[in-house]
């Protein structure tokens, strides 16, 4: 199924192709002017690759229409309002995105979230966060500003103690066992989760593996008040603010919340995961 993002990117590619043919250039010709591989021109025109603002400015120059750069970059901005590539967001490392998260959290009264394969960033210990950032830096082959990113994530957690805030999170039980760090660090992280249960601003629900579900926990997402949903994929972060999307993700959250356990039952599930570390 074609997504809105793919459709918008294809439309931008069609516009690039229209401008190229209007300038009397074939694919090889514009590639030579730009100093690009012919394959890059093809990917951009077919909507298979997202151009950068500099790509679009160079395209406008290459066809002899530099005044069109504003139109093209405006179209790109429209796409990236909802779909933000990790490649660009993390180009200089993780800290900038974490600073942005601090601002987003500061402007939000209630956050609801679901995580299916990791501990929510707002609940992470410094060592667990460090392991997460290190693994992601290696995977994405980006700058390693890990210590700065960890410090920034810890600053964001100060919001957990602000009166009037609400953080309601669901964690699928399987996430308690996903380990990308040492057993000692993972055990401390599980202890941290237990310590948050009972905090007046935090509601932590664990969705047990054996629970009967109305819907499977397909992927994680965060809902900011009733104005924004953020969903992470491998290469893109989706920012969805239309009413239909918000209602859909609220329903997904409510259905899973109905199957979650809280308080002492949640603590027992976390304790079971922690005890399993001793058997390794």
Image (cartoon, rainbow, N blue to C red):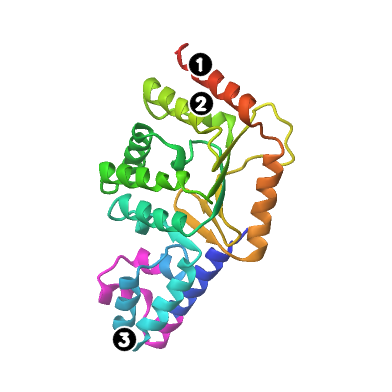
Q: Is residue 35 magenta?
A: yes
Quadrant into which the C terminus falls: top left
What is the magenta range? 18-42
Position of residue 213 relative to residue 20, above or below, is above
Helix, strand or loop at label 1? It is helix
Q: Position of residue 67 (x, y in %)?
A: 34, 88
Front one among 28 and 9: 9
Horizontal side of residue 143 vs 178, given as left or right? left
What label sits on residue 66 in the rendered view? 3
Task: Answer whether labels 1 and 2 touch (C-beta < 8 Å).
Answer: yes
Neighbours of disc 1 within 10 Å: few (<14), some (14-19), many (20+) = few
Q: Position of residue 111 (x, y in %)?
A: 55, 50
Residue 216 visible to an observer of this rendering: yes
Helix, strand or loop at label 2? It is loop
Q: Quadrant of residue 96?
A: bottom left
Q: Earlier in the sequence, mark 1 or mark 3?
A: 3
Task: Answer whether labels 1 and 3 touch (C-beta < 8 Å).
Answer: no
Task: Answer whether labels 2 and 3 touch (C-beta < 8 Å).
Answer: no
Front one among 74 and 100: 100
Kindly identify which residue carries mark 2. Answer: 177
Q: Position of residue 133 (x, y in %)?
A: 34, 41
């Amino acid at each position: 199924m074609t997504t809105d993002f793919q459709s918008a990117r294809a439309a931008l590619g069609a516009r690039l192709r229209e401008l190229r043919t209007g300038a009397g250039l074939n694919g090889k010709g514009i590639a030579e002017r730009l100093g690009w591989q012919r394959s890059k021109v093809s990917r951009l025109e077919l909507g298979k690759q997202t151009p950068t603002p500099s790509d679009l400015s160079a395209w406008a120059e290459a066809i002899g229409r530099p005044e069109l750069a504003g139109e093209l970059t405006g179209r790109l901005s429209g796409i990236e309002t909802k779909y933000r590539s990790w490649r660009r967001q993390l180009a200089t490392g993780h800290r900038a995105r974490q600073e942005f998260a601090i601002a987003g959290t500061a402007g939000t009264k209630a956050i609801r979230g679901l995580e299916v394969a990791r501990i929510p960033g707002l609940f992470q210990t410094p060592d667990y966060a460090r392991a997460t950032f290190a693994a992601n830096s290696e995977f994405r082959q980006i700058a390693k500003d890990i210590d700065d990113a960890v410090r920034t994530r810890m600053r964001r957690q100060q919001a957990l103690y602000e009166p009037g805030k609400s953080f309601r999170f669901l964690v699928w039980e399987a996430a308690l066992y996903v380990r990308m760090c040492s057993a000692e660090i993972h055990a401390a992280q599980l202890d941290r989760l237990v310590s948050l249960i009972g905090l007046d601003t935090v509601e932590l629900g664990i969705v047990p593996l054996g629970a009967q579900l109305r819907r499977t926990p397909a992927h994680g997402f965060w809902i900011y008040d009733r104005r924004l949903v953020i969903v992470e994929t491998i290469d893109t972060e989706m920012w969805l603010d239309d009413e239909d999307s918000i209602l859909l993700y609220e329903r997904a959250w409510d259905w899973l919340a109905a199957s979650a356990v809280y308080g002492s039952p949640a603590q027992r599930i976390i304790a079971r995961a922690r005890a399993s570390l001793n058997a390794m």
